[in-house]
Image (tube, rainbow, N blue to C red):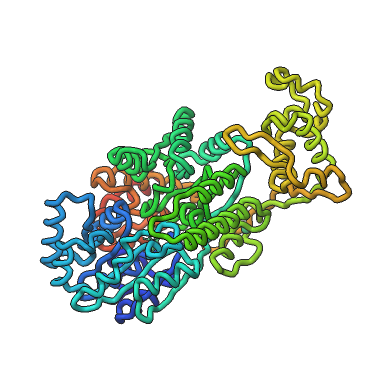
Amino acid sequence: MTKEEALKTYFGYDAFRGGQEPVIDALLSGRDALAIMPTGAGKSVCYQIPALLLPGITLVVSPLVSLMRDQVTQLVQMGVPAAYLNSTLTFKQYLLALSRAKAGRYKIIYVAPERLETEGFRAFAETADISLVAVDEAHCISQWGQDFRPSYLNIPAFVKSLPKRPVVGAFTATATPDVKEDIERLLELRDPLRVTTGFDRENLYFEVQQPDSKKAALLELVQGRPGKCGIVYCATRKNVEEVCGFLQERGVAATRYHAGLEAEERRRNQEDFLYDRAQVMVATNAFGMGIDKSDVRYVVHYNMPKDIESYYQEAGRAGRDGLPSSCILLYSGQDVRTNEFLITHSEPREGLDARTAEMLRERDLQRLRKMAGYCRTRRCLRQHILRYFGEFAPDYCGACYNCLHNFEEVDVGREAQCIIACVSELNQAFGVGIVAETLCGAETDKVRKYHLDREQSYGALKDLTQKEVRERIRFLLEEGVLTLSPGQYPVVRLGERAEDVMRGGQPLLMKTVKEELPAAPRRAVPDELEGPAAELFQRLRNLRARTARMQGVPAYVVFTDRTLREMALARPRTVAELRAVSGVGDAKASRYGKAFLAEIAAFEGEG
Ligand code: ADP
Ligand code: ZN
């Protein structure tokens, strides 16, 4: 079988995506490879196809148990004999899997890095014919990366211990130079073929909002996308609880995931989301690595993550099927302060000398500043991300908030003076909201309680809305004209630049949205379905949901949204026509073909 045939027979795809082919060729020819591809680019195919074509077994080292189970389920659905070995198996199950592995029953075995050191596994590996070791999430070997896992450091020793050195492939979505270097060096790759594919994900739309109320903004985002699946990432468990409860109270089918929940609840909630029983997953960053639900239509960050790597990885879980999807970050200045606090107060990792610990901290702070820069920039957001990863990008993408809006600079010098005067009149003792209420001359309980209507600044900016005043206060906070006190109820204080501004003389330019521009059509991104195709698509989705339930697998494992879309457009009548649809391999055609063809025929009959 050729690699093209394997791609069509098992995966049902007609062509390789950028970067896949050279990596597959290298591994098949016995050369190590290091593949750096963004989430959703199709890394798994790069080692799964060699696994099918090489004579022996392929071991896939993977850090997360949920990832393994999902990938193995998908492979089995495609007719590939695969298994996983990790801590979720009982000892008996483990021994059974191991004995089957010894008997040569599997082509692909997923294994947790910790397993490599166990005696039972070593004994198996010494006698087995291992052709390829694929290291997934290879950045876990580097302490410069976000998720360093010491057990990854044992991989090279394991490879060396084998009677015959297998070819080694390393895969990651992290592209920073130090991490890349660490992977090559620590994994002891031999003259690897290095492939880096474009980090751009054309189907993703990017936006940063700085709302007054994150909850209200989130609700609007969720309610504006009925029937669509989304992930909402929060910084803390407490936030997850709060936000999930809030959405549920408003009638949204939301569920939650964080490390503080019992394993059983985590599993159940994750499945509710995977199986489309819950539309919105509210989670900490503990959720998602290895979740390849392909039809996530939006990812909202309720808090700003600590760096752009984390952000792009999490946001990249939207739209893995290539259909248009949104990545929206709800930013507040507090997010930056919280992260700063976490970085400067975190315990250094055990065994690190003081200098290295200090260096790591400095880097973390630098990364944080780049992330904050993303939230504040008025320039193309996609460009900001791609440049961060060292990739060239034009300064207009046509598919991010900043590219779709015109901004204008207005001089807010006079207004800033009113705000500063008000803050000092209020003895630097009130929060943003009350300062804005006072300046706008609002008649609220707080204003009455503290007799703020007797202040000189009361109503000084009554021509502006409270929202506009808050927007200006936030701008002044960013500019260092004002500062916020630390703590749970921050109050507005004067910053180092306040005096300067009071003296006046220089314009103080703030960018505000002037007008919305029409979206530019992006290449390669399919449009939303309309008319009968949309109707048929929905029917096929329903059939998929029923089928998945019966099989006890997540819906996207049966067929992805992208495949169902194509089916709805092509309306195949025969198995051969169905096989021409991207994503329909042999095993799935024979397993599900009849039912899906019948559904299409029924739809044609009614139409
Ligand atoms: P990654 O591991 O890089 O995040 P995956 O391997 O999960 O990405 O692939 C993302 C999606 O793209 C999957 O649904 C996968 O089946 C699909 N895919 C991979 N290669 C191809 C291809 N050559 N043609 C079409 N779809 C592909
Ligand atoms: Zn842009």
Quarter holding the N terminus?
Answer: bottom left
Q: Residue at x 61, y 51 (%)?
A: 375
Q: Quadrant of residue 388?
A: bottom right
Q: Residue at x 46, y 58 (%)?
A: 322
Marker count (numbered): 0
Q: Is residue 596 visible?
A: yes
Q: Residue at x 37, y 71 (%)?
A: 186
- Residue at the farthest front position: 354
- Residue at the farthest right position: 505
Left or right: 283 in relation to 98:
right
Q: Quadrant of residue 116?
A: bottom left
Q: Looking at the image, which is closer to me, 495 or 537?
A: 495
Question: Within the displayed image, which quadrant is ligand 1 positioned in?
Answer: bottom left
Give the vertical position of 163 relative to 402 (above or below).
below
Q: Looking at the image, which is closer to me, 466 or 589?
A: 466
Residue 45 at x, y = what percent?
A: 34, 66
Left or right: 500 in relation to 553:
right
Residue 25 at x, y = what percent?
A: 35, 78
